[in-house]
Image (spheres, rainbow, N blue to C red):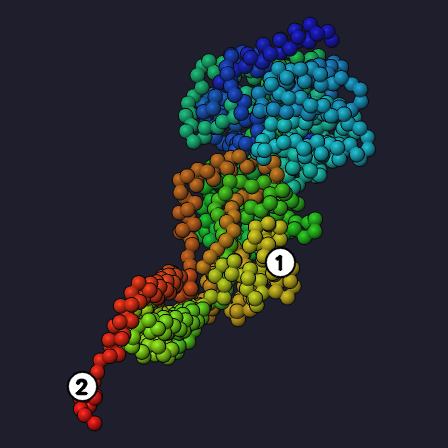
Amino acid sequence: MSLSLRAWTICFILMNAMLISMTTKVIVLFAPCDESVTNILHLVRKSVRRHIVVVANHHNRVFMNKDTQFTRHDLSDACHWVSEGTVAVLAVTSTRKLWHGIDSTAHTFKLPHLVVPDTCSKSCSNSPPLQPELLELAIFEYLKDQYLHDVILLHEGDGDDGNLLAYLMNTHCVRMSYLQATDGPTFFKTFERYFDNWNMADLTDEGRLLVSLGDGNIADQVLVNLIESSMHNKRTKILVSGGVHKWQERLLRVKAYEVDLVVISRESVPAADCPLAIEILPTGYHGHGCMKCEVLSQKEQNLGRAILTGIKEDLRLGRCCSPLDEYTIWKSFPAELGAQRLRPVAVWANDTGLLRMEPLDLETITLRVAVVQYFPYVVYHMDNGSVILENCVLKHILKFVSKRLNFKYQLVEAPGDDWGTKIGNEWRGAIGMVMRGEADMIPYLTVTPSRYAMIEYSKPLAHVRYGLLIAFPVEPPRTFIFLRLYKKEVWLALFFTALVLSYVLCKMTVVSTQYCGPRNIKEKLRSFPRCLWLIFGILLQQGATHLPAMSSGRLLLATWWLSVLVITTTYSANLIAFLAFPETTFVVKSLEDLSVHKTVTLSIKEGCPVLEDFEQSDVEVYKKIRETYLLNPNRYLKFSTETKRCCAVEDVVAGRAVYVDDVNYLFTMVKKDYEKWRYCRITIAPKEFAWMDLAVGLRRGSSLLQPLNDEIQQMRESGVLHHWRNQYSSRRGECYSIERVLPGQREVNLEDLQGPFYFLLLGTIAGLLLVAAENAYRRFRRKLQPQGRAKKIHLSNQKINPRRHLSMLSPH
């Protein structure tokens, strides 16, 4: 085909595609599950295109991503159809499905309808040969309104398939890449590395598409391996050509995730999901909450009758086969029991372009919810093999969300009371159920890196912290409580300080007496025992008979008095606190205390989310826990997932172990133990750690993710999640309020009294300097007045005793 012919064809298709009305709809109901639905859809396409040519701008958001809620229409209520602009209903019956109720409901609103048994599903042998350019045009018409930023074309052989598609996508600012499929295992590894090296900062991005237009075995096998092994980690949609039956069978083998698959085909094949309801010219939005049901206007009735008349005439004349190139586009959708079904979403022909459709659910889909007992969020009991929710947070959430998103739910209990534990390469518990296709969602699942690689997470429903279950602290004996007010180092510091000060005071006195006569100094302070009693007397706030006469000694005692004032006041206040309030001793108070404890054993349950941090994190406290406990079998006990948590209680009560778990589980354990023994034997350490999110776990690529996130966001902003949690949360206050009675009560250590000791050291240094200054001053003064001082001494020595003087004057 020449370039001018290609350009003319492209312009013709694009101009035709604009002449589409989105203000009216046509509903097609197809019941014969053994007959092809393709031909009847193309008959509808021709008749609709013949009569509906009103230009309307419509953003096809419903076809961009799988983020819409399940849409269901009840045949007994045609108000749903009329309120959304439906002008005609075509119902193809079978012996098993006669579509009862359409006549009565449609007549109420004068809705044109046609019920026929003819499926027009005969084989068309006169179809024109396949033209790759038209196939690529059909693909472009379907993709041009979608959110795409990267398209990868998978080639096999030397063909030039995809060139026109690449050119058209480039005009819409989409980056194109090419991969040449080759035989051998090395290509698949290269193929995986190609995806792994792609920079995908946004994990919710759905803007990548892998396209395979050929039907070669190599490319086909590559896609099969990709889907069955690691498609859930690639965040890439797939578009293939032909083989609707083949791809439907492959979809049924995929259980762990949803594949966003599009198949474009010329085959006349029956629908995999049958009976089928299809909305022609959909808007993607269903306003069931504010329906306005009125009788159709005469213009709308005439339009509907004209469309149905054209279809009826083509059926009567057997115009089931067209000489044009016609393609049906199928897309994967979730179905019952976690399966996926291909449903038609558009038909294309080279005369009228693309006609979009939307599959409708005639029956509400049922989602399987895997649950584990988790107070206060998930509380249930078993009744004849069925899980019955009691009053809890999950009950309110499911009631609200199922009504908003239009689905039913079935509760299934996870085996072994296990959220999800990886043993080797196999996942067990609730996550294992999702991976095997036995469940569709897991509410209140803790987010961890290993789990995030396997399943999808919604926005957080709540947050949780982890704690330490320890023995309930007991009050120590009160016999010598007055000695427990200060730590040992404080008492030792006071004792040695008194000895040092006594020695310093004694030496100051001795030095001072060398320059002062005994009349100016108290000689009794030259004795070390007397200085010691003076210092201890001041410590006990007692007075003294003899005090230093020198300034240096007085300065030293002044600083000691001020320090004693602070020390004794602290002691008195702490003594009142210890006598008025009970003292408690915890095994450990925090994870930091546990990391340096010398005797206790760490016990934890296998699969506990915080265990992953203990084993892999580089945080300093986690590394200490790993080295002290996890690498030491004598101090580490890991319970299996089948072991009940109550088995860890007795070792905790005895003080031999500390149990680590989610605080919600720890609260439940404390509550049950209290109800059994009627007093508190265990409690939770005051300091918690490891903040983690609780979210809804879904299969990878789940179409429920985006609408569920919207509902969670609404519940969080309105405050109902917080309200429901407070409504069902209760704790045994007497087992938790130990530290809250007097948060500041504790032993006084040296750090608390470092101020008085520093002040005392400063006073001692100042006193010693003052002694040196006094001595220097007296020496200097003696040197200035040596003669005067000698004369005074001489005169004092020449003083004569009067009696002796008289005896000297008397004659012999």
| Residue identified by numbered label 2 | 802
Q: Residue at x 65, y 27 (%)?
A: 209
Q: Furthest-bottom residue in view?
A: 812
Q: Amino acid at mark 1?
A: Glu
Is residue 241 depicted above or below 516 in this figure? above
Q: Identify the element where label 2 is drawn.
A: helix
Q: Earlier in the sequence, mark 1 or mark 2?
A: 1
Q: Nearer the viewer, residue 228 or 619?
A: 619
Q: Is residue 3 above or below residue 123?
A: above
Residue underneath mark 1:
627
At a point 50% along the width and 66% down the height, the residue shown is 587
- Residue 78 placement, left or right of 368: left
Q: Say few, some or many: other residues with alpha carbon within 10 Å of mark 1 (under 14 / 14 to 19 / 20 or more).
A: some
Residue 225: where, in percent of width, then height?
A: 74, 35
Q: Position of residue 306 (x, y in %)?
A: 54, 13
In the rendered image, residue 200, in percent from the top left (x then y), is placed at 61, 32
Q: Position of residue 408 (x, y in %)?
A: 53, 41
* Vertical side of 519 occupied by 153: above or below: above
